[in-house]
Amino acid sequence: MHEALISYFTGEKQGGLWFLGTGIVALAIGGWVCRHPAWYRAILYPLLIVGMIQAGAGLVLQLRTNSQAARLEKQLFENPAEYKAGELSRLEKTMLGFRVFKVCWLLMIAAGVFLAYRSPAESPRLAVGIGLIAQGAAMLVLDLFAESRAQIYAEAIREMG
């Protein structure tokens, strides 16, 4: 079980770097877009809003993961039953969050496709649609990897003695 714990939290730190990097790239693209035609600058709304969420989530994962893993590692050795109950409860909430966010990201992509499809060329709605598609897809991919890590970790906990 110790290996599963370490593997999960190592993955969380790596995932945090992906979130942080994706957010920084989105914010940098936002800065670059400012020099483009006015209609295209509307892409800034999804880029900057979701980019801040991405960067913030990545930063939180980087700052809290080591201490969280150390606390749980100690608990695993001192009180395995409490560790199992607490982590399974936490992971149930986490998995529910992934299901909710998956719907949100899919709706974001669908809204972006709708806007892009229904907008005339060189319109702010087209730019917003493109941004929604890009950011929704990025968040969906990042969360699918995180969800997979959480499922593997939860299964290892369930199999504990």
Image (cartoon, rainbow, N blue to C red):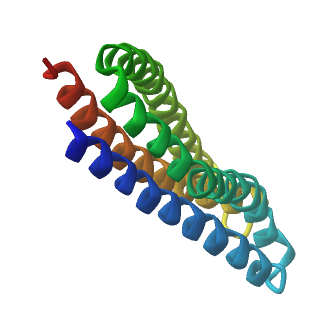
Which of the 4 image quarters holds residue 69? top left
Quadrant for the N terminus, please.
Answer: top left
Seen at 42% across and 51% down, the residue is 12
Question: In this rendering, would 111 be left or right of 81?
Answer: right
Of the pair 55 and 49, the residue shown nearer to us: 55
Q: Is residue 100 above or below residue 71?
A: above
Quadrant for the C terminus, please.
Answer: top left
Of the pair 27 and 111, the residue shown nearer to us: 27
Of the pair 50 and 118, the residue shown nearer to us: 50
Q: Is residue 16 above or below residue 2?
A: below
x and y, in percent, of residue 94 in the image: 46, 27
Q: Is residue 148 above or below residue 154?
A: below
Seen at 51% across and 65% down, the residue is 17
Q: Residue furthest front?
A: 78
x and y, in percent, of residue 7 in the image: 28, 51
Seen at 72% across and 70% down, the residue is 27
Q: Is residue 157 above or below residue 34?
A: above
Q: How many marks?
A: 0
x and y, in percent, of residue 73 in the image: 38, 39
Question: In this rendering, would 144 be left or right of 128?
Answer: left
x and y, in percent, of residue 28 in the image: 71, 78
Seen at 35% across and 55% down, the residue is 11
Of the pair 100 and 58, the residue shown nearer to us: 58
